[in-house]
Each structure stands twice: as structure tokens, then as C-alpha cells.
Amino acid sequence: MTRFPVADFRQMDTPFYYYDLDLLDLTLAQLLRAAAHPAIRVHYAVKANANPVILKQISRAGLGADVVSGGEIKAALNAGFKADDIVFAGVGKTDREIRLALQAGVGCFNVESLPELMVIDALAAEEGRKARVALRVNPDIDAHTHRYITTGLAENKFGIDMRLLDGILDTVATLDHIELAGLHFHIGSQITDLTPYILLCERINALQTQYESRGIHFPSINVGGGLGVDYANPARNPIPDFEAFFKIFSHHLQLRHNQTLHFELGRSITAQCGSLITRVIYVKEGISRRFAIVDAGMTDLIRPALYNAHHKIEKLNADPEERQLLYDVVGPICESSDCFGTDELLPLLQRGDLLAIRSAGAYGEIMASEYNCRPRAAAFFSKKK
Ligand SMILES: *Cc1c(COP(=O)(O)O)cnc(C)c1O
């Protein structure tokens, strides 16, 4: 789907991020079509990519924002998200961040612990405001994803254990500056088998029934994000199956009267519109391996080094007749984990060739670092059709 303007790329300094804004538009359109229901609100998880151009396009499409820091609150407001459409999550909100959120008037705090709840109540009192809070519950569901990106299991720093929820709800009822917005869940990321979401719906149904018998009603349910993308075939599957995703919830979640259903999607919205464009600096022939040493590294895209993730690597402007060879595609950083792929079958590579490392629009640019005193790579955007 994404067409790369390779002639332009030849003149440009590498590495850089390239964003296909038409694909982002199409993705947002399909997402909104699949989520078109008066009770549903979709928030974009800003942590996936906070590039101002991307954020503005997403806010213009009418999504809300899911943020995890004071910096993200500012980025979201600057991009035009309305404060009321911002939900503020995170296990370690500082006093300064909570005050900023209260002053801005964010729509909801997703609260992850009792001490956090008490601090929000106290700061809201000082600010003369009432904070709307959703309690993040740990539903103890295995999302079958990477250990570092699964969040819904019991042994986890995130969320409140279901067994402690009773006590915390009792406390909420006693706090003058807290208004209960509902319950919040998030079971993990890069989830491609949707079964865990069915389990989540069932868990939520049971919790709602249990609390209704005690007269507690939750105005909203937030089921988080985590929908995965096809890293192996970005060209074949440039847009995730949003319809199948939302159908799971309409079929399995028993939403109550007047209840709103919130989603927080990050990766599924921005991953496929971004690529990291890099140049081959050297081709190094070893004894048993052949290395393509490129000018992008883990400082520009850390997912392979951090989670053993694999992104599809394509040679740009490859001649289809060219013979293919096996390469280890590695970056210049002084870490052995700075490797984008081993035994990658690629058309013959030479110094100066351009490669696209695909699906880099989420958790790419935003996780960049300056390790080895490397400058941050620039971002370029397709011209909108
Ligand atoms: C990271 C995160 C998201 C977004 O996850 P994706 O996998 O990018 O959709 C949503 N909600 C919370 C609480 C998160 O931490």
C-alpha cells in the first residue's frame, strides 16, 4: 500500500522515519466505521507515537487521547485533543502531573492503586475540583504475548488485584473529591489472537453482576488497547481487522443501560503507516555470515533489541530479477542486540542501497534515544493525496 518516493529518498540523509499519511487516514476511517456506535469512545494511546503531525491528524479524526505522563497531556492538548477527551493512566503519576491534569480538566484518571487514589483526592481538594476516576483492575488474563508487554496477569505492577477492588470501592465512596467513572482494564499489547478479549468480556460481565447486586453501577467501562498488527506482512495487511475486534465486544460484553465503552488503541492505529528508512553502509563478508551494516540502529527503533521483535525489511527499488542472498542486517551501535534481523533473504545489497524497515510507526520514533551521541532521526511525511 505504501509507495516510497525512492528518487527523493536518494538525496536525503539517512536514517529517517517516513510516514504515509494517506494510510493513516484510511486506518482511521476504517477504525471509526467499525467503532460507529453511540456508546463507544476510542482514545489514541499517545505513547505509541507522539509526533505532532501524527497526533494532529488523529485528533482531527475525532478520537480522544490516552496519556501516561504530564508530557503526553501537553502533547495531546497541543495537538488539539480536548481535555475532556483525555484519559490519564500510569502507575506512577507524580503530584506535579496530577495537578497539571486537574488544572487542564482531563476527562478521567485511570487509577492503579489506593495510595494514588488518596493523593488525587487530596490534590483535587486543594485545586477545588472533583476528579473523575476509573479504577484499573487487573483481570488476570494471559494475553499470550511477550513477557514485557503482557500486563493483565496477577503478578504485575499494573492495576488493582480483583480481590482488593471491594475495599477500594468502599474508600471511593468516602472521598469528597473523587467521582467514580468506572472500571478500566488493559491486558497487553500486540494481541493477534483475539480470544483473550473474549475472556476479558466475560470477566467484566461477572464483575458487573457482582457489583450490581451491591448497588454499584459503573458509568463507563474501559477495555484498554493492545490490538496487534501484522509485522510479517505489512503490505498485505496494512490495516488491522478493526471490525473483528469491535465485534468481540458487541457480542460478548454485556454493556449496561447508559454505560459508555472506551478503548485505548495505539499500535493498531500508527504502526503500519511508518517506516524507518536506512542506508547500507557496508556489506561485510564473514566466514559463515554476511552482514549488511546499516546506518539505523536500536537508537532509532529499539523493538528488535528490546523484545526480540521482527520488522519486515525491504530493499527499495529492488530489481525483481536480482538474485537473493542471506544477510544479517545490523546497526552501528556498540551492542550485540543492535540487530534488525538474522538470515534475512534480500536482493543483493551494495553500499548505498536504501532499505525500509516496515511497521515502525508505533513504538519507533517515540522510543528513540541518543545513545552513542547519535542525533535523533528526522521524520518526513507523504504528501496527502
Ligand atoms: C500501552 C497502553 C495502551 C495502548 O496499547 P497498544 O498495544 O499500543 O494498543 C492502552 N492502554 C494502556 C493502559 C496502555 O498502557
Image: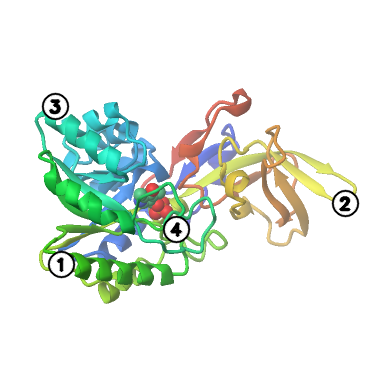
Q: Is residue 337 left or right of residue 145?
A: right
Residue occupying the point 82% across, 41% down: 284
Q: Mark 2 — residue?
A: 288
Q: CA distance from mark 4 to mark 1?
A: 25 Å
Image quadrant where residue 8 sits: top right
Label located before the other in sequence (4 or 2): 4
Q: Dots 4 and 2: beta carbons under 8 Å?
A: no
Image quadrant where residue 305 sits: top right
Circle on res. 80: none
In this view of the protein, which residue sits in the foreground, 33 or 319?
Answer: 33
Label located before the other in sequence (3 or 1): 3
Q: CA distance from mark 3 to mark 1?
A: 33 Å
Q: Mark 4 — residue?
A: 153
Tell me which amino acid carries mark 4.
Leu
Image quadrant where residue 53 sits: top left
Q: Residues within 10 Å of mark 4 (few under 14, many from 20)?
A: some
In this view of the protein, which residue sits in the foreground, 157 or 2?
Answer: 157
Q: Is residue 381 above or below residue 258?
A: above
Q: Mark 3 — residue?
A: 126
Tell me which amino acid carries mark 3.
Glu
Q: Is residue 2 above or below residue 129?
A: below
Q: Is residue 300 left or right of residue 191?
A: right
Label located before the other in sequence (4 or 1): 4
Residue occupying the point 56% across, 41% down: 301
Label located before the other in sequence (2 or 1): 1
Q: Name the secondary structure under disc 1.
A: helix
